């Protein structure tokens, strides 16, 4: 049962009970209409309360029904709200904690509303590329005014009930309860007080106007359009509020329906809904049940105070978890601490961090040169040089000193986590935690599951990731894990495109127009071209038959390592990040073509985008097939959170699904015929070929 029915004296109480946030799924909707039916048929009952059990009034739609026909199955939310409006006895919404989306629309359909202070109120549909679809667009402006309602709908952000209650003339709340604890009691008294009120007030009957009319909405539209390029929904939220001020309620409802249905079909909304579900799915590991016990992590040790060690430490300090950093030399510790201080101080200067918070965080940071000082830490994360020999020394020391049950994590970006685990007598406690640089900023965390990593270690690390506000995705052990393994193929395609006739700027511009935050060459300059160079030197030994463009090696031979040397694929002016094309680099590429006997050709932007994106897709299909990633949506999250893939395209797998896997495979077959490309690579991964042949999708 997902809605409970009880009668207290002459008041019926319908309590939504569908944890965690009382989502308005089918069974809950039936519960509400059943309750209304019973209450109206019971002569003893004079008024009705709708409220929510636990941590919410209602968070809105039930994500389990997302996009499925069940969401529309009668009674759908519109019908439920109509039943509430049509109740012969007054219906009071008693709102607390969370009242969002469909939950707020339901409350707006009630005759009266009483709210507890501290209740988060929102219509967040814009975040899924939509407008509210159950009357919220027409009712919220009637109770809060067009301007406030429009701001709430365009931003999707929650506002506390106490703040809304202070708005002059607001009609959202008929009464504010003194506290969440007294809400039930006050709602009962309020329901009794309105038992005989007739006619029953309906939000739909309230007037809705904006004093400036057209001019105001035109202004709002211009602002919102400028701020939300690539996303159609925000401006539609402006339009529908304007309609509320111009048309009759029922006409507004018809317009809401029409726009809602049209937005549901847009690739942008599909992408945003996919990400919403993918984000929640990422923390679920198929063979690790949700109730797997987690180890307590109340203190963390970090080995290495370099670029990554410092950033990783900040994540834990920000979350209030004490950190002890270990280095080989005091100078290295001093440098590491100074960098952390500088980072925090810049946040203080920008007003993003309060001075006392900064001091509090720094007070939780201690340092040592002695492994024995780490023995009490619940978790240790190693971020030393990327060399197996160094990792071996470190993990042998950790195995010696760490208490039993401590989690031993490595931030390695390329090395074999199984091998690292084998340096200890407790491989079950060893796991990879691959942060991205800058580690205190980037949202992505690849959690690398070794062959022997214990399930409770994985569950704990996923829990820790949440505490430090990272999007964690589990990857199996392979070279590059999910993200870097894919990016290597993407980079290789970038190189082939140069060989064939493109300039770095042309490639970057094409993929940036597609929506990437940065093209492959600007990205190389940011990360340091020498890193890829080192990897390729290793690769040519491991895979002597690997084909790749030598242009990147030639660039490094010119000493152009990227932003850090002021010159890479582009030139950089100190203190600025603008990429300025460089004539010598273009000459180097031309000379390389000549030496290889290549006649350059004009490559279309469309081909550039397809080759770069499909190289990701094909490698991802192999990653999926090998079980390195457990679901396609995890790969999307890696690319969205760690590699600047455009949000409104929902990640490489979602994008491929939308293009159609058959079409993707056809393009790959065409690329395989290009003598300057890698035909072997473009053979579609078996999983991709199979899905395409069956007309299926990844997700
Ligand atoms: P870094 O060179 O900035 O820092 C490494 C630090 O480790 C240095 O301060 C060094 O003194 C210290 N160190 C070396 N050996 C040590 C030992 N035996 N005991 C204690 N401290 C020791 O290197 P970075 O960039 O921070 O990389 C560290 C690790 O993180 C590497 O495994 C790297 O592959 C990985 N990583 C790096 C990323 C990046 O973008 N820089 C991204 C993700 C992972």
Image: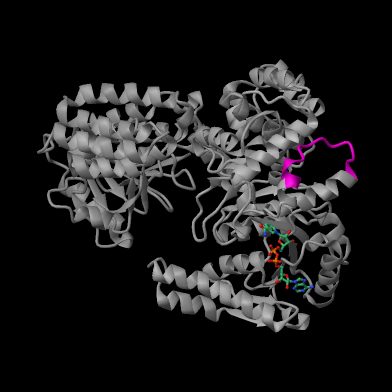
Residue 323 shown left or right of residue 13 in the figure: right
- Residue 359 lies, in percent from the top left, at 47, 79
Q: Quadrant of ligand 1?
A: bottom right
Q: Residue at x 84, y 76 (%)?
A: 400
Taking the image as shown, residue 630 lies to the left or right of residue 42, namely right
The spot of residue 441 in percent (x, y) is: 54, 58
> In the figure, residue 49 lies in which quadrant?
top left
What residue lies at 30% left-to-right and 39% top-to-bottom? 224
Farthest left residue in view: 211
In the displayed structure, 10 sits above or below 233; it is below
Q: Could you tell me residue 114's position as x and y percent? A: 24, 50
**Residues shaded magenta:** 542-554
The residue lying at 39 percent from left, 36 percent from top is 229
Seen from the viewer's position, the closer of residues 303 and 247 is 303
Residue 408 spot, x, y in % from top left = 76, 66
In this rendering, the answer to whether 134 lies above or below 427 is above
Residue 347 visible: yes
Q: Is residue 448 visible?
A: no
The image's colouring method is one colour
For residue 643, side relative to residue 39 (left or right): right
Image quarter of residue 518? top right
State whether the magenta stretch is mostly helix, strand or loop. Answer: loop
Q: Which of 315/514 is in front?
A: 514
Inspect the magenta stretch and tell me whether residue 228 lies in it: no
The mark total stands at 0
Residue at 85% in and 65% down: 426
Q: Quadrant of residue 406 in the image? A: bottom right
The residue closer to the viewer here, 204 or 47, is 204
Image quarter where the C terminus lies is top right
């Amino acid at each position: 049962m997902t809605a409970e029915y009880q009668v207290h004296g002459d008041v019926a109480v319908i309590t939504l009970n569908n944890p965690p946030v009382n989502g308005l799924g089918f069974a809950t909707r039936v519960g509400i209409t059943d309750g209304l039916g019973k209450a109206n048929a019971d002569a003893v009952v004079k008024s009705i309360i709708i409220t929510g059990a636990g941590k919410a009034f209602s968070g809105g739609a039930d994500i389990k029904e997302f996009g499925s026909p069940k969401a529309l199955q009668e009674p759908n939310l519109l019908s439920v709200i109509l039943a509430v409006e049509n109740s012969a006895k007054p219906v009071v919404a008693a709102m607390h904690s969370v009242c969002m989306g469909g939950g707020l629309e339901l409350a707006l359909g009630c005759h009266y509303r009483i709210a507890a202070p501290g209740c988060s109120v929102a219509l967040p549909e814009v975040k899924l590329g939509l407008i509210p679809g159950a009357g919220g667009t027409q009712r919220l402006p009637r109770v809060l005014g067009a301007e406030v309602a429009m701001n709430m709908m365009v931003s999707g952000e929650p506002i506390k009930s106490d703040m809304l209650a202070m708005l002059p003339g607001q009609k959202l709340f008929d009464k504010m309860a003194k506290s969440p604890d007294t809400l039930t009691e006050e709602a009962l008294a309020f329901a009794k007080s309105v038992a005989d009120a007739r006619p029953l007030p309906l939000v739909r009957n309230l007037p809705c106007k904006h004093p400036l009319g057209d001019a105001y909405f035109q202004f709002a539209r211009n602002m919102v359009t400028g701020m939300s390029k690539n996303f159609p929904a925000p401006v539609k939220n402006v339009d529908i509020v304007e309609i509320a001020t111009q048309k009759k309620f029922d006409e507004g409802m018809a317009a809401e329906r029409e726009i809602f249905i049209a937005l549901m079909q847009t690739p942008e909304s599909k992408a945003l809904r996919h990400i919403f579900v993918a984000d929640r799915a990422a923390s679920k590991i198929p063979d690790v049940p949700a109730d797997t016990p987690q180890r307590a992590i109340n203190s963390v040790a970090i080995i290495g105070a370099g670029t990554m060690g410092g950033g990783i430490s900040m994540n834990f300090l920000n979350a209030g978890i004490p950190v002890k950093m270990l280095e080989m030399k005091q100078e290295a510790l001093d440098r590491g601490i100074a960098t952390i201080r500088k980072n925090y101080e810049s946040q203080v200067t920008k007003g993003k961090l309060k001075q006392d918070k900064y001091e509090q965080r720094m007070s939780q940071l201690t340092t040592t040169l002695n492994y024995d000082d780490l023995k009490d830490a619940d978790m240790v994360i190693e971020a030393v040089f990327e060399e197996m020999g160094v990792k071996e020394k470190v993990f042998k020391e950790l195995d010696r000193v760490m208490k039993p049950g401590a989690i031993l994590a490595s931030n390695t970006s390329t090395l074999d986590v199984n091998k690292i685990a084998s340096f200890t007598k407790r491989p079950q406690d060893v796991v990879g935690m691959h942060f991205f640089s800058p580690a205190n900023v980037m949202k992505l965390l690849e959690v690398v599951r070794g062959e022997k990593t214990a399930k409770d270690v994985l569950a704990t690390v996923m829990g820790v990731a949440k505490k430090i506000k990272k999007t964690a995705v589990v990857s199996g052990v392979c070279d590059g894990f999910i993200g870097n393994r894919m990016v290597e193929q993407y980079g290789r395609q970038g190189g082939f495109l140069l060989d064939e006739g493109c300039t770095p700027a042309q490639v970057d511009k094409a993929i940036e127009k597609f929506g990437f935050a940065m093209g492959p060459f600007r990205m190389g300059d940011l990360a340091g071209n020498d890193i890829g160079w080192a990897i390729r030197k290793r690769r040519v030994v491991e895979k002597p038959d690997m084909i790749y463009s030598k242009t990147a090696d030639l660039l490094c031979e010119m000493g152009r390592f990227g932003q850090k040397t002021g010159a890479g694929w582009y030139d950089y002016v100190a203190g600025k990040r603008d990429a300025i094309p460089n004539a010598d680099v273009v000459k180097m590429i031309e000379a390389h073509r000549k030496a290889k006997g290549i006649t350059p050709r004009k490559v279309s932007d469309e081909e550039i985008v397809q080759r770069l994106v499909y190289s990701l897709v094909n490698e991802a299909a192999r990653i999926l097939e090998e079980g390195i990633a457990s679901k396609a949506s995890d790969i999307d999250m890696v690319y969205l959170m760690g590699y600047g893939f455009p949000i409104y395209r929902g990640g490489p797998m979602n994008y491929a699904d939308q293009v159609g896997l058959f079409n993707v495979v056809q393009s790959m077959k065409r690329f395989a015929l290009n003598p300057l490309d890698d035909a072997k690579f473009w053979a579609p991964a078996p999983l991709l070929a199979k899905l395409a042949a069956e007309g299926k999708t990844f997700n």
